[in-house]
């Protein structure tokens, strides 16, 4: 049983998805999805434990030897990402029941949980597999499920947002497929470890370079790295609240994982940094992304959209970390991957509570929220403070590592810009505080507005609590990501 | 009780008090007694640390290690103890005053007010006893965030505007400069712990140290060095007790205290003297003193005038620290205490005048001395303390600061301190003098006869205590002096 954990991680939600259609009753389906997600979480915890204890796990699908058959390879990097994805997925689905009931009719609820599990399985598959074509397959599974999930939104504009994402996402996936095709053409293998062995022999042939460029651009599209982020704000703003929380906490994180995997493991960090001006490109685009997206976020009226732009900015930080490409910087990126999932997961769940009560996530819905929904508002404030990067929250930990990495590499300007970026975050977070605590709720409005239901509030506060807990007791994330970064880049120091 | 226990208590009492205040919110009198009892207990435990420290014992406490090498840790050292004594002692007095003021003025949300007040004091204790720059930074930021609801207490648009400037400047400078300086210190020196004689090794390039010093001086926005002083006048939208304790004592003194500590225990006086930037920053502090004094003269609003006077006086403390001589340091540390007593009294008076006579402008105060003799008398004493002439404690700090400029051979700066003292006479003294010796304006006599009386007795008692303190500090400066000597 324990030796089959890598495949179990993926197959569990994949098989569970169609079973949802058989159960049909929405609250039962919810409970079933929750069980499956929690099961996946347990599996990922066991996997991480196993990897820490005894090194990378290689699992041969159907017993076929590695370069010919499909290999699932779990090392520290993907064990960590699996834990993040399953943990956040479970927290989000735990909060889903009442919010989904409010935002969708009965028939669509079952559909929602089916799609959610498919998407979940796809994301886990991308992370777990050690085969590049398998990556593409799971990418398509998760993407198609995502398009449908976004289209479930109440607002008719969600259809348009889903379509927009469909076009952009398909271009991205096609680019990745072209890249994989080129790689296969040159090496005759699809296994990541095998590719990593064979690619250096080819030197920098133009086909390999083209493959590299296609894959990087394709993944960056899925990652929503500035300026390829255009699909993200609409998708986040118009999707159902729970879907937004799920995507923000997991989907972009998986894309980031994919970027690191291709750049570091498949192509090799030396090739990646020398063949293209990737270092300056990532640092430059990342920082521009941080500033542009943060400034745009300040002017948003819809808070879901505001946080979406903030996500684009935060992705900028992570990419800057990859760009600096030292061990500490990589650790900062991986830390921020986890930390940002916690922040945005908590914030979007809090917004889901707001939408549940008020039916809107516009800034005027926040007026007087400090009195009507004190717990939800407090969660938003703490999540926001973590987003800014105040000490004693997780946001501080990743910023600290990123700035340290920048200064260690003598990039003082980068360090300063990272710091200034968090100040802009302070501005948009403070808009919420001012609205929540200083403006009065509209007098003629619904006086019965109360706190969000407990089923939403508890998962929200678990995530918000994690923001503080892991900001104070930093051992788990710091030790694991430190080991991962060392494992990935230890050789180049 | 052991010394470590006392230290633990000093950090926890205000926090427990905040919880107690929140729980007893429905019963006004009970709530206020929680504040007062907590204040007394806090002051007692801080004072009990005094003999331990004077005996030279080390008192250290580790809360937790956040990242490897970055710990929330505390250590009592003499300057921090001095700051903690001043802040905790004046907390009791301010609570007394606030009870009278908040009730007399009929303010809303008093429970929130007193609770955040207590949390702010907890943050101040954390700053005073911080063992390293990381701990200090954490509590520095907590102090900024916890005072924000106090500044914007009125909840009006004007309060929100003021709060924005307040938060914007304090958060902005601390994140953009202070944090960067701390991280750079960490990378250069490998430690953030405060150490006698500084943490940098001899071969650190002077240019880099200069840059760091500049980052620290600007980064600690609470020290209100121009051009980052705007938050202080903006914070005057707060209720008067907040202006009194936080923006004359706790917050601004936290700022200059941090600078003092950074100069003394991160750079070390030796290193500080050799850095080229020190000279320029001295001139900047001098300019800040002079300009703020000139601006203060032109302020009609009483609280605004006091705020700019604070900016000017904070410049003295920064200047004293940057002189990098032992007399300069002594003067700075003393001025923290003297200015605290003087300025808190002045704000208490301003608040008492507002509550009793509903007056906020300087021009309206003519002839008020006859109706409010105690308040205006205290105002006079406190003004003398700020200016630095007997019979008040301010004399000592000015004395040592002047001595410091002589020791450092900065005759220009000595002249500048003299001039600015004259300016402070010009903006402070006319207020009590006119109150006593001029007739009230004819337009005001009509409604002034509607029996303006002294403020409620708790407020009056509070300002009496602090004004007496100003005088006593002239006679008994020794306790403070010994502590400072042990610290430098």
Image (cartoon, coloured by chain):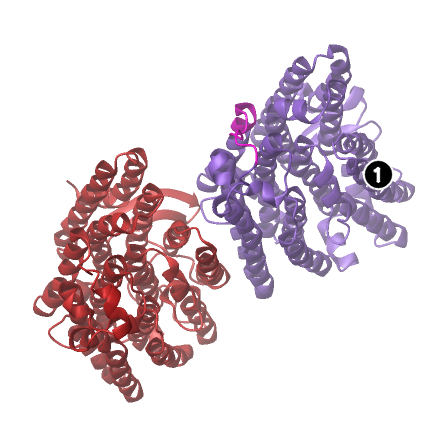
Chain colours: A purple, B red
Residue B249 higher or lower than A433, as above or below: below
Mark 1, residue position: A163
To which quarter of the image does residue A237 belong? top right
Residue B291 higher or lower than A101, as above or below: below
Whether residue A485 is in magenta: the answer is no
- In the image, what residue occupies the spot 83% across and 51% down? A213
Q: Which chain carries label 1?
A: A
Other-residue count near label 1 (Cα within 10 Å), few / some / many at <14 / 14–19 / ≥20: some
Q: Which one is nearer the viewer's eye here, B452 or A1?
A: B452
Whether residue A451 is in magenta: the answer is yes
Q: Please, which residue is most extreme toward the front here?
A: B446
Q: Please, which residue is most extreme toward the right here?
A: A185
Instruction: Please state the horizontal and vertical placement of residue A94, each as a whole percent of the image.
Output: 60, 24
Q: Please, which residue is most extreme toward the left here?
A: B475
Instruction: Please state the horizontal and vertical placement of residue B330, each as a whole percent of the image.
Output: 21, 71
Residue A297 in the figure: left or right of residue A477: right
Residue B266 seen: yes
Residue A288 higher or lower than B402, as above or below: above
To which quarter of the image does residue B475 belong? bottom left
The residue stretch that appears in magenta: A445-458
Q: Is the magenta stretch mostly helix, strand or loop?
A: loop
Instruction: Please state the horizontal and vertical placement of residue A21, each as a whole percent of the image.
Output: 77, 15
- In the image, what residue occupies the spot 70% across and 43% down? A256
Quadrant assignment for the C terminus of chain A:
bottom right
Residue A59 in the figure: left or right of residue B233: right
Residue A266 in the figure: left or right of residue B77: right
Quadrant assignment for the N terminus of chain A:
top right
């Amino acid at each position: 049983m324990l030796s089959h954990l890598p495949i179990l991680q993926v197959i569990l939600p994949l098989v569970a998805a169609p079973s949802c259609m058989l159960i049909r009753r929405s609250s039962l389906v919810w409970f079933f999805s929750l069980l499956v997600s929690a099961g996946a979480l347990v599996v990922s915890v066991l996997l991480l434990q196993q990897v820490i204890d005894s090194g990378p796990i290689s699992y041969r699908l159907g017993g076929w030897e590695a370069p010919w058959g499909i290999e699932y390879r779990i090392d520290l990097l993907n064990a960590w990402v699996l834990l993040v994805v399953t943990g956040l997925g479970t927290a989000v689905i735990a909060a889903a029941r009442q919010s989904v009931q409010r935002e969708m009719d009965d028939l669509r609820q079952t559909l929602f949980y089916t799609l959610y599990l498919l998407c979940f399985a796809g994301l886990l598959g991308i992370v777990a597999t050690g085969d590049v074509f398998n990556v593409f397959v799971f990418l398509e599974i998760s993407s198609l499920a995502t398009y449908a999930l976004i289209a479930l939104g109440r607002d008719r504009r969600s259809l348009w947002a889903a379509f927009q994402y469909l076009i952009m996402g398909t271009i991205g996936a096609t680019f990745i497929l072209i890249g994989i095709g080129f790689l296969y053409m040159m090496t005759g293998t699809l296994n990541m470890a095998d590719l990593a062995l064979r690619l250096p022999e080819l030197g920098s042939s133009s086909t390999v370079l083209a493959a590299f460029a296609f894959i990087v651009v394709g993944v960056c599209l899925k990652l929503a790295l500035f300026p390829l982020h255009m699909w993200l704000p609409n998708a986040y703003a118009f999707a159902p609240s729970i879907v937004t929380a799920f995507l923000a906490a997991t989907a972009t994180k998986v894309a980031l994982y994919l970027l690191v995997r291709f750049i570091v493991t498949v192509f090799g960090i030396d090739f990646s940094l020398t063949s293209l001006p990737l270092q300056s490109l990532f640092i430059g685009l990342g920082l521009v992304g941080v500033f542009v997206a943060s400034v745009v976020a300040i002017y948003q009226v819809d808070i879901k959209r505001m946080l979406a732009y903030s996500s684009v900015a935060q992705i900028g930080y992570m990419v800057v970390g990859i760009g600096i490409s030292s061990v500490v910087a990589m650790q900062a990126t991986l830390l921020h991957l986890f930390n940002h999932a916690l922040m945005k997961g908590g914030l979007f769940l809090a917004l889901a509570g707001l939408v549940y009560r008020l039916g809107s996530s516009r800034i005027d819905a926040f007026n007087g929220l400090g009195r009507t929904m004190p717990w939800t508002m407090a969660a938003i404030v703490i999540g926001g403070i973590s987003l800014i990067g105040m000490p004693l929250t997780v946001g501080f930990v990743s910023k600290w590592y990123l700035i340290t990495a920048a200064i260690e590499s003598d990039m003082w300007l980068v360090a300063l810009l990272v710091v200034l970026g968090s100040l802009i975050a302070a501005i948009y977070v403070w808009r919420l505080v001012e609205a929540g605590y200083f403006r009065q709720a509209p007098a003629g409005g619904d006086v019965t507005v109360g706190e969000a239901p407990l089923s939403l509030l508890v998962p929200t506060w678990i995530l918000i609590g994690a923001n503080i807990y892991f900001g104070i007791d930093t051992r788990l994330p710091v030790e694991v990501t430190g080991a991962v970064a060392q494992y990935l880049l230890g050789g180049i120091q | 009780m052991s010394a470590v226990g006392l230290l633990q208590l000093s950090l926890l009492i205000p926090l427990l008090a905040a919880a107690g205040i929140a729980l007893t919110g429905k019963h006004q009198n009970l709530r206020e007694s929680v504040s007062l009892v907590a204040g007394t207990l806090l002051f007692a435990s801080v004072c009990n640390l005094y003999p331990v420290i004077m005996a030279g014992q080390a008192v250290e406490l580790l809360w937790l290690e956040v990242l490897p090498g970055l710990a929330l840790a505390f250590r009592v050292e003499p300057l921090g103890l001095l700051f903690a004594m001043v802040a905790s002692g004046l907390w009791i007095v301010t609570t007394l005053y606030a009870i009278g003021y908040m009730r007399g003025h009929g303010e809303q949300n008093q429970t929130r007010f007193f609770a955040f007040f207590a949390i702010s004091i907890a943050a101040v204790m954390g700053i005073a006893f911080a063992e390293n720059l990381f701990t200090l930074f954490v509590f520095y930021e907590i102090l900024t965030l916890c005072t924000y609801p106090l500044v914007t207490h009125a909840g009006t648009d004007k309060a929100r505007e003021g709060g924005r400037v307040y938060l914007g400047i304090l958060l902005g400078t601390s994140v953009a400069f202070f944090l960067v300086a701390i991280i750079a210190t960490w990378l250069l020196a490998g430690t953030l712990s405060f150490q006698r004689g500084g943490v940098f090794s001899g071969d650190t390039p002077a240019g880099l140290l200069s840059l760091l010093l500049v980052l620290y001086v600007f980064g600690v926005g609470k020290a209100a060095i121009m051009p980052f002083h705007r938050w202080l006048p903006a914070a005057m939208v707060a209720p008067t007790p907040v202006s009194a304790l936080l923006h004359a004592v706790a917050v601004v003194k936290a700022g200059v205290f941090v600078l003092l500590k950074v100069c003394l225990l991160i750079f070390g006086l030796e290193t500080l003297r050799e850095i080229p930037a020190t000279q320029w920053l001295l001139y900047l502090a001098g300019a800040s003193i002079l300009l703020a004094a000139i601006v203060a003269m032109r302020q009609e609003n009483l609280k605004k005038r006091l705020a700019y006077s604070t900016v000017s006086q904070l410049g003295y403390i920064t200047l004293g620290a940057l002189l990098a001589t032992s007399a300069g340091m002594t003067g700075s540390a003393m001025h923290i205490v003297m200015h605290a007593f003087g300025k808190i009294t002045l704000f208490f008076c301003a608040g008492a005048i507002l509550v009793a006579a509903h007056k906020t402008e300087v021009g309206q105060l003519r002839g008020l001395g006859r109706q409010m003799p105690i308040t205006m008398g205290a105002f006079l004493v406190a003004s003398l303390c700020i200016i630095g002439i007997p019979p008040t404690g301010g004399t000592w700090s000015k004395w040592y600061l002047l001595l410091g400029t002589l020791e450092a051979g900065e005759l220009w700066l000595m002249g500048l301190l003299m001039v600015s003292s004259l300016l402070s006479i010009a903006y402070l003294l006319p207020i009590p003098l006119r109150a006593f010796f001029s007739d009230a304006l004819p337009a005001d006599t009509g409604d002034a006869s509607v029996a303006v009386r002294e403020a409620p007795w708790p407020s009056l008692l509070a300002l009496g205590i602090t004004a007496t303190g100003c005088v006593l500090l002239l006679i008994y400066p020794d306790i403070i002096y010994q502590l400072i000597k042990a610290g430098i």
